[in-house]
Image (tube, rainbow, N blue to C red):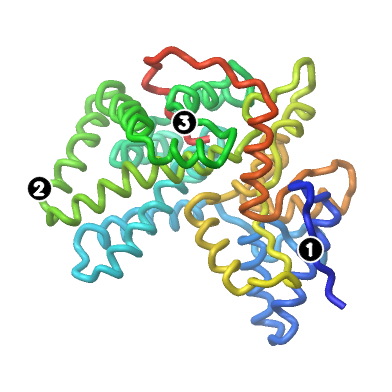
Amino acid sequence: MKTTFTQTNPLLPSRDALALRDSLEAALTSRFPSWLAKWIGIYLTWLTGLAPTSTLGQPVLAGSEARSFAFTVAALILGSVATLFSPSLMITVVGGFALLHGMRSFSSVVGHHMTHGAKVIPGSPQLRRLLYDLISAAFLLPSFDAYKKDHQQHHAYAAGPDDADQQFIAYLGARFNGLSRFVLALLDPLFHLRFAKARLTGVLLTGPAWRRTVGIAVPLAVILLAPSAAVIAWLLTVIVRFQAATLMQWSTEHLWGQRPAGRSLVETATAVTFGRLLLPDPAAPGLWWKLPAYTFFRLILLSGDLPNHDLHHLGRGPWVNAPYIRTRLILEGKIELRQTTSISAMFRLAFDSAKAGKAPPRPPREMDSHRMLGM
């Protein structure tokens, strides 16, 4: 008899989450030959953010920083070409999502982990910095130095009033204490204008001249060379859709404003982060529409190791093998991890926390243009 896992509390205990992951693996691979079942299992590990018990926390397919960068660049290039020059509406739409995934992945995976010393981009340190600043300028994303400066402050003061990320979110006018306010923030022109202003200022008015030139030349080339409808589609993706997707990711990344006083870094990280696993119950109805929906959500909003962002703040790496590390930590039982297992649960937890918490003070109307993070 199959067991249905229910959540009155959005947070599922570690052992229950692992049991749910094992049941999903068994349900989806039991009818297939072993070679195919292996690849289905790898896909499920990537999708859910948690590996099955059978792996014992050891990677079946080890992660690769260079591979992650290659996929990101491919998504940026192919997505841009498809969005700007495809004669097919379907390819244009798919290309827009590929471009959006590439931008989200470049910010929250490549840039994020480079600030922690990961060699995501192959080559010498100078080449890595050059490539990062070149690509980030082309898509109006922060420079490496600006990103690293604010991200270090984020880790030092995570989810507290001095957190640069939290201050920037407040500056944008985003509110997470209810679904209606959150949706209004996503649709608010002022939110998008402030966000776009910070991005443009960070690229066009700061940094070396060559980077500012790239920030001007790429959008100008798009406007001059692509059809007008394609230009609109590209700008909507690079500006509006990227910013909306980023806000949706931010909303559940931390329990904002909930930083406890006088705690260790590990205790603080545990208090303000949680695993955002995408782990449908195979015994519950709707599995076959949830899997593609979760896959889309994973690609666009929770790229890289973001389902396991709590492990990042706990200092448990390497990030490319985060799902396996989560399984190993659960099996060891030395730390009790907290996780949601559905899209609705992760938003419900974040919104409930925002309602119960004290809203952080709003920063000045004008902020340092560098504060536009990628977290």
Determine which residue is flagged by label 2. Answer: 224
Instruction: Say which label, 3 or 2, has the lower sequence index.
Output: 2
Instruction: Say which label, 1 or 2, has the lower sequence index.
Output: 1
Determine whether 103 is above or below 287 in the image: above
Please name the residue shown 40% across and 23% down the image.
370
Please name the residue shown 75% across and 31% down the image.
271
Local packing at callout 2 (Cα closer than 10 Å; few below 14, some 14-19, many 20+) is few
State the CA–CA distance, disc 3 to disc 2: 30 Å
The reply, left or right, for residue 242 in relation to residue 11 is left
Question: Which numbered disc, 3 or 1, marks the residue closer to the eye?
Answer: 1
Residue 155 is marked as none
Residue 319 visible in the shown view: yes
State the CA–CA distance, disc 1 to disc 2: 52 Å
Instruction: Say which label, 3 or 1, has the lower sequence index.
Output: 1
Determine whether 200 is above or below 224 in the image: above
Local packing at callout 1 (Cα closer than 10 Å; few below 14, some 14-19, many 20+) is many
Determine which residue is flagged by label 1. Answer: 20
Residue 373 is marked as 3
Q: Considering the image in quadrants, where does the N terminus appear?
A: bottom right
Q: Residue furthest right?
A: 333
The reply, left or right, for residue 183 in relation to residue 64 is left
281 or 47, which lies in front? 281
Residue 125 location, x and y as percent? 45, 35
